[in-house]
Image: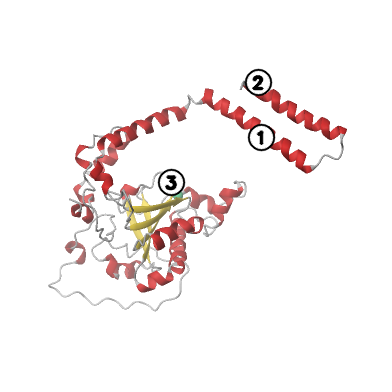
Amino acid sequence: MNRHLLLLAAFALLTSGQARAADAPVSTDVEKEKIRLIVKEVMREYVGSLNKSHSSGGAKDIVRSLVQDNKTFVRTHKPAYFSHFLDSQHPRATVVTCSDSRVHTHALDATPDGDLFMVRNIGNQIATAEGSVEYGVHHLHTPLLLIVGHVACGAIKAASGDYSKESPFIKRELDSIQIPKGDSGLSGVKTNVNNQVRHAVGKFEEEVTKGSLTVIGAVYDFKDEMRQGQGKLHIINVNGENDPRRIAALEIMQGLDAPDPHAVAAHAPRAPRPVAKPKPAAPVHEEPAEEAKPLKKSMIKLPEKPKDAGKDAHKADEPKVAGKKKAAAEDEEDPHAKPAKKAEKH
Ligand SMILES: [Zn+2]
């Protein structure tokens, strides 16, 4: 319908409603609501007609780029790639992270496809996606729940300041980030991650207690604010434990880069613990733990996955990517960046 006709129709409906109200002063709420709905429908159609002629802006180019990328994906991924998750999914970890586009799944899993049950929202929260997190833990039975915050998080910055002018929906999602006002930086990010882990450990207490679930809190540092490598994933909390020395001593952390013992632990309120006894000096013949272990860099040793045959079937014939994606492709070629599970998949 011509947009001018639509506007005319909307105007006619509005004025007829007013005229009728004037003729019959007792205009019922039902009638008013009917008119409101009709006008709303006409306006929706009008906006739809606008989009047809206004779709040549940025969105058009983006859609073309996405469709082209998908075509390449279809062409370069053979049936073997899809075969292991065709009928069901068996992700190894439920991951709660921020919606921020700078937090990448391939930063912590070289082949995240079918591997990570991803839950994303602003501020990497359990509370605003509780059903999704429960689904990963209770229905997909992932033995690991990984909560990943990140440096320079906009949600943390907003939550630590005045967000009273945001929409009710955004306010609701910021309300559940419990950090001190003014704590907008890395410290606020860590506090939030610790809070989320505490929430998760309480929520899944039974699974954590019997050992079928481990909850890990981490911070993804794509700005190298912690001076331990740009893009490093720092584990700061394991099942509620956020003391770096205690975390380093945990069995699950053996063979991984230990958290910096000089890092400030705290921020998350937790039950007081007895002071840890110093570890006895290692016997002379033992190799230092760090040197003896195969896993390096930021990779978390995820639980082994039984069915990975054919998972890399597409890799050989993937074309070189260009532009901004090239850097990611180059990263994948870094032999030091490959996790242990990569080798299992061949
Ligand atoms: Zn964020």
What residue lies at 38% left-to-right and 47% top-to-bottom? Answer: 103
247 over 339 or under it: above or below? below
Q: Kindly report the distance in space between the C-alpha atoms of the residues bearing marks 2 and 1.
A: 16 Å
In this rendered view, identify the residue nearer to me: 305 or 326: 305
Task: Give the residue at x 17% y 50%.
Answer: 346
Q: Position of residue 271 (x, y in %)?
A: 46, 74
Residue pointed to by mark 3: 100
Disc 3 and disc 1 in contact, CB within 8 angstroms: no
Specify the color scheme: secondary structure
Q: Amino acid at mark 1?
A: Lys
Q: On the rendered structure, is 75 left or right of 181?
A: left
Residue under label 1, please give it: 40
Dot 2 corresponds to which residue? Answer: 4
At label 3, counting other C-alpha atoms closer than 10 Å, the crowd grade (few under 14, some 14-19, many 20 or more) is some
Position in image of residue 139 (x %, y %): 40, 60
Q: Determine if the C-beta at disc 3 is less than 8 A from ligand 1.
A: yes
